[in-house]
Amino acid sequence: MKIRKGIPLLVIFLFGYLYPSVNTVDIPNITKKVDRVFEKFNRFDSPGAAVLVRLHGRNIYKKCFGLANLEHHIPIGPECSFDLASVSKHLTSFAVLLLEKNGQLDLDDDIRRYLPELPDYNTKITIRHLLYQSSGLWEFWTILNKYSGFRDRDYFKMIDVLNLLRHQGELVFNPGTKYAYTNTNYSLLAEIIKRLMSRTGLTEIRDDLSGKRAALYFGHGMDGHSALALGRAFQWMGCDVEAINADSIKRDGLSRFDVLAIPGGESNPNPWQELGLDGKLKIQNFIRDGGGYIGICLGTLFASDNGYFWGNKWGIDELYLDIFPGVAYCGQEKIAPKGSWPLMTYLKICGHSHPITALLPDRIKLVCYPNGPYLQPYELKNATIIATFELTGNPAMVAFEYGKGRIFLSGPHPEIDVESDRDGSSKFSNLSDEESDWPLLLTAMKWITAH
């Protein structure tokens, strides 16, 4: 099939500086003149344009011409989306400067303050570096095209870019030392803008945990959706959150934080092998000396004394964290058959005497993976069971102390907010939930950091 190509245009005229007010403008005359400019596109076999003339906050002309798709004869309409390409970079930088002017960010902020899932390169990448194209980050288009099977016009999401960047082991150059034009820099700026606007405009931002610092483990095998959602939840609580990797933990990088969080991930022993015995000891000492720990799904399995995967012994015994005095069992056929898609499942709250459960309803509904674990403490006195799976009665969440530190573990995923896009993930958009479980995470974090 022969494809006839045409590029539709979005045209915006801003006349605010030419005319002091709308009343001094001959609007009918402007309308005629703009019509004449675009009349050659007003046909059914031509690419066209969407035209907007705006003056002092008022639209004085708005009209569409020609086709958005020549092959299928789809006309341009008022709801038509346009690929602005790199024109959007000017708008993005302007938006960043507006946020700076309003005191919502600083150009010299570390970008991991807003994008905690990015790796720690042992050097600071600032918003200014992104603006000036001097970050040292990969050009994501090159990687997607050459190594991931994407084509130039394929649709991708920001989660694809973030998942790609979290595997960038080292920078191309030290930030601020060179100029290298990439779409990566401005894509990240757009994501920072989105998250800030979500925090300050569209979604309530709490300051309950202002000043607390959370380290979000983002090593090999971590699930990008779980990590992103958990980071967003921490930001909603008012926490400062940064990604941390195995090398940083082994270099005493946890000393700057109040809590270590390990999100969900793949069913393989990558975290065990990355951290090794040295990393295990660092985490144990961090918690024993008063630090907190939150484990979600894989992070819960990792925290256990040992684990089973669908009835089989799993992992390397000596590399489990051994902070939970019990066993994690992955897989419950009655809840989610092996190999099935994640689903929603009900948990029963085990009383309301614990600070985490004091304000919770009697049952809650969470995302559960088919390989998600349940927990069995060796002795009930060693841990408080916060909630059980309604269908099986198996413990789903526990809370306990380890030395001077406090720990909260969850087999299912309270960080996933399926009815909202504030968690940054659309992976679970096919599921439904009555309400968010972020308040549960908030009470868990408040309990962990209260002492």
Image: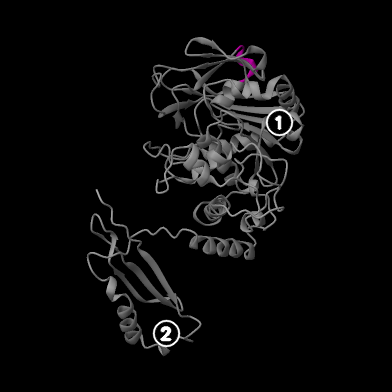
Q: Which residues are magenta?
A: 378-383
Residue 364 seen by the camera: no
Residue sitting farthest toward the top:
312
- In 3D space, how far apart are the residues under numbered discs 2 and 1 (Cα atoms)? 61 Å
Given contact means CB atoms under 8 Å apart, are the residues at marks 2 and 1 in contact?
no
Q: Is residue 408 magenta?
A: no
Seen from the viewer's position, the closer of residues 359 and 124 is 124
Please give the name of the residue rendered at 76% of the width and 25% of the height, measured from the top-left corner. 285
Quadrant of residue 256 within the rendered picture: top right
List the residue tagged with mark 2.
22
Q: Work out whether 363 lies above or below 394.
A: below
Nearer the observer, disc 2 or disc 1? 1
Which quadrant of the figure contains the C terminus? top right
Q: Which mark is residue 247?
A: 1
Seen from the viewer's position, the closer of residues 94 and 4 is 4
Please give the name of the residue rendered at 72% of the width and 44% of the height, measured from the top-left corner. 123
Seen from the viewer's position, the closer of residues 380 and 212 is 212
Give coordinates of residue 84: x percent, y percent: 44, 60
Going from N to C along the chain, the mark reached first, 2 or 1, is: 2
User: Which structural element holds mark 2?
Assistant: helix
What crowding class fits label 1: few (fewer than 14 Cα within 10 Å), some (14-19), or many (20 or more)? some
Give coordinates of residue 125: x percent, y percent: 68, 49
Q: Amino acid at mark 1?
A: Asp
Residue 102 in the figure: left or right of residue 14: right
In this figure, what is the number of numbered marks? 2
What crowding class fits label 2: few (fewer than 14 Cα within 10 Å), some (14-19), or many (20 or more)? some
Residue 27 seen by the camera: yes
